[in-house]
Image (cartoon, helix red, strand yellow):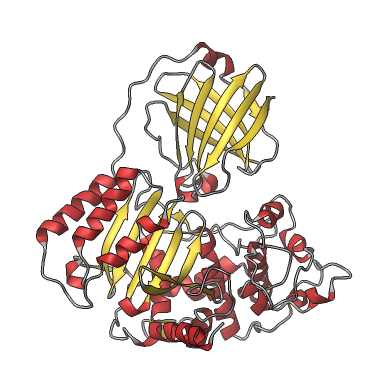
Amino acid sequence: MSSYRRSTLVALALMAQTVFAQSTYYPTNGWRESTPEAQGIDSKTLADMVDNIAKKKLNVHSVLIIRHGYVVLDAYFHPYNAGATHDVASVSKSITAAITGIAIDKGLLKIDQPVLSFFPDEAQKDPDPRTKSITVGNLLSMQAGLDCGFLPGERELEDMRRTNQWVKFTLGLPVKVDPGTKFGYCSPGYHLLSSIISQVAHEPLLEFGRKNLFAPLGIKDVVWPADEQGRTHGWGNSHFYPRDFAKIGYLYLHGGKWDGKQIVSEKWVRDSTTFQADPGRGPNSGYGYGWWLDKVGGNDEFGGNGRGGQRVAVWAEKDMIVVVTGAGYPGAEVGPPVAASVKSSTALPDNPDAVKRLQASVAEAAKPPAPLPTPDLPALAAKISGAAWEFPRNASRIDGLQFVFDGKAEAKVKVKYLGTDLSFPVGLDGVYRLGPWGPLGLLAGATGKWTSDTDFLLDLNFVSNINHYTLALHFDGDKVQAVINETSGLVRNGKVEGKRI
């Protein structure tokens, strides 16, 4: 890495603490709101973006833009809504890194401490000598050296989740390269970080975070599951409301300070948003401690990125925070238009017509579609109603299905997902029956339609938990052939055969 590039990224981190120090209010109890023009942003450009997302039915769930401390856009796209929390996926790593920094600030652990020292009962009896040299800092910068995260698909994470001893599984991974020498996007390594916090704080990462990070920021509702040993999923699966999650970006924008109190040390914010590893994404990209460094729409950015397009982006030079949730969408449809909307560092002339159009676009994007006519069910529907099918283990995580067809407008489906039973009403009129049907009892919905006398297309949308599936099902006696796609990239054209049980 050139000294110029490193110095540029260091300056970017420092900018977050100095450029907009005049923004002294803190949204502990809620954000201020403003028209875009009052903060130098063009409403028409934002309205065009919202209309484009809605027209193309992109899998964007929400877009939140904050400038100079003011919310200038808070858009929600059906079926997601402002009353639902949302999985931020691997942006959780940014949170885990922040909480780890707080623990280091408190003297509970050190960044150069060997990882194995925390797990004497779960480490292998005779580990590779290189495993002994893996440090907390190596985990944070994704340079543990374990054979993990070097191939697409996060296979190691999926394998870990199918065991009941996640820490033991991760510590048993072979070493591929010397620790500290190469970036490998290893989610299980961030579960080790969470488990380390559990060890030193004597409570799960989530509870330690509630007391030391979330509560001071006024963040009350956080859903973050744990493994069978009670250790918070350090790599992902944390759920926040977008307006709450923006507070994390605001905290880092202000150098870790919040309402006169240093929540995370300035040094930790600086180190976390400074180049620590090269992820191989090009000359403008880098990785700190749980935070990505990049350039979007001409803006230098540090932020958290997650599967499906979850983002909290900090554009320090613009004094902006952009939070996006979704289920897999083209990033070019959001980041560049937001960047293009920024016209000035000071207020633009009022544009009430453009503001009115933006408000109308946001309102329209939140509406559900009109119901479609419902044809009569084929004879097969009655024959398979109540029957259950079991799938072999596959990349979709869907292990089985059971349908009940008892009306033209609505059916029911039971889904076995990673071994957990979920039940959904299925709109046969093209409209989701939204409710707490998804994993962790969070917002989800389903629609479906018969495409022939033997074929059924199921749209299974976990909404708050990102995954959005389409399952093209062909029923043939005691078998069902399924072609499964998931919009965030979990599975593409996955072909599996289920057996009736």
Which residue is found at the position 20% from the left and 72% from the top?
Answer: 40
Give the residue at the far right of this rendering.
Answer: 126
Whether 385 is drawn above or below 117: the answer is above
Residue 272 versus residue 127 in the image, above or below:
below
Q: Is 426 rendered above or below residue 174?
A: above
Q: Position of residue 243 (x, y in %)?
A: 36, 63
Q: Tell me if 443 is positioned left or right of 173 in this view.
A: left
Give the residue at x 34% y 79%: 317
Residue 127 vs residue 293, the one in the foreground: 293
Q: Position of residue 45 (x, y in %)?
A: 23, 59
Q: Left of 484 or right of it: where is 134?
A: right
> Is residue 276 at all visible to an observer of this figure?
yes
- Residue furthest top as drawn: 379
Left or right of 295 on screen, residue 72: left
The x and y percentages for residue 125 are 88, 69
Q: Quadrant of the N terminus?
A: bottom right
